[in-house]
Image: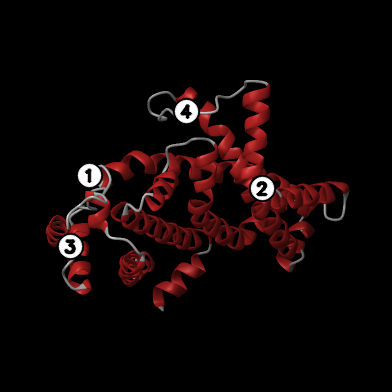
Amino acid sequence: MAYVAKRILTMIPVLLFLSIMVFSLIHLIPGDPAQIVLGQDATPQSLAALRAQMGLNQPLPMQYFTWVGKLLHGNLGNSLLDHTPVSTLIKQRLPVTVELAFGTVIVAFLIAFPLGILAAVKRDKWEDFTTLFASTVGLSVPPFWIGILFLLFFTVKIHLFPSSGYVPIWDNFGKNLSVMILPMVATGIREAAVLLRMLRSTLLDVIDQDFVRTARAKGLRGWSVIVRHALKNALIPVITTGGLQIAGLLGGLVITEQIFSLPGFGSLLVQSVFSRDYTTVQACALIAALLVVIVNLLVDLVYGLIDPRIRVNRGRS
């Protein structure tokens, strides 16, 4: 518990720093939010009145504390374009991106783990070379290109999957899966290639260690040694890489959502940036940063579950 409490407490200064960064960067962007709301034909008097109403004539530190105070009460402000609460927009879009990221990770692990283990066990054999070649191709081809190929073949050519028409998973699981499977696989291939190479490398290091030789000397069969002894000790670098990939997915999924016409969080952020909807951009950037911090926290907690020595050492320090 001390380990978990310490990790949660370390999030507080990180979140405070991120809030300052997001608030400061947004205010460095050129443009007048009041002008966006009222349009180009607004009079100077109406602009001044709206700036006073929005608190834009206050000093920046005062604006920051006002913004943080609203955040603590769950108020992310209203969109400058249609005055919809930003929290409502994010609630509508974020589940799409979370589902896409979650499905991408599942696809990546389903591909990476069996092939990574196979490549390590069959080192320097044709299975190893074939797997390495496939992972190199997966790393070399960008996910958006794979997505376009998938659309052309599976949607346009053989009409196996729809090209758009997202339906929430709780409304119709089958329709949701038919729309989401292609973007999940298109993005997951690259993530799988990274995890596969990392797992192969760490497994090869572990396989050569004394405790694995001892297990084999006791008569344990090859796959039993890998699964019960070697794999657990090889997982920590793989989890580190996987955690960084999940955090990075938020940026990569923006393009995937655009290609497959998914109404996700990333597309909301892109639309807000192009329309200079500062309030929405500010909230989206903060939520994205918060998600990255949460992913890192979960990765650290998983470290502790896999290797109790990490939990004990970090809990004492």
Q: Earlier in the sequence, mark 2 or mark 3?
A: 3
Q: Name the quadrant of the N terminus.
A: bottom left
Cα distance in 3D space between marks 2 and 1: 45 Å
Q: Secondary structure at mark 4?
A: helix
Kindly identify the amino acid type of the residue bearing the numbered disc 3: Gly
Q: Are marks 4 and 1 in contact (CB under 8 Å)?
A: no
Residue 119 screen position, x and y as percent: 77, 51
Q: Earlier in the sequence, mark 4 or mark 1?
A: 1
Q: Earlier in the sequence, mark 2 or mark 1?
A: 1
Q: Earlier in the sequence, mark 4 or mark 3?
A: 3
Name the residue carrying label 3: 69
Tag of residue 83: 1
**Observer able to see residue 16:** yes
227 left or right of 310 in image: right
57 left or right of 136 in image: left
Q: Earlier in the sequence, mark 2 or mark 4?
A: 2
Kindly identify the amino acid type of the residue bearing the numbered disc 1: His
Q: Residue at x 43, y 59 (%)?
A: 292
Kindly identify the amino acid type of the residue bearing the numbered disc 2: Ala
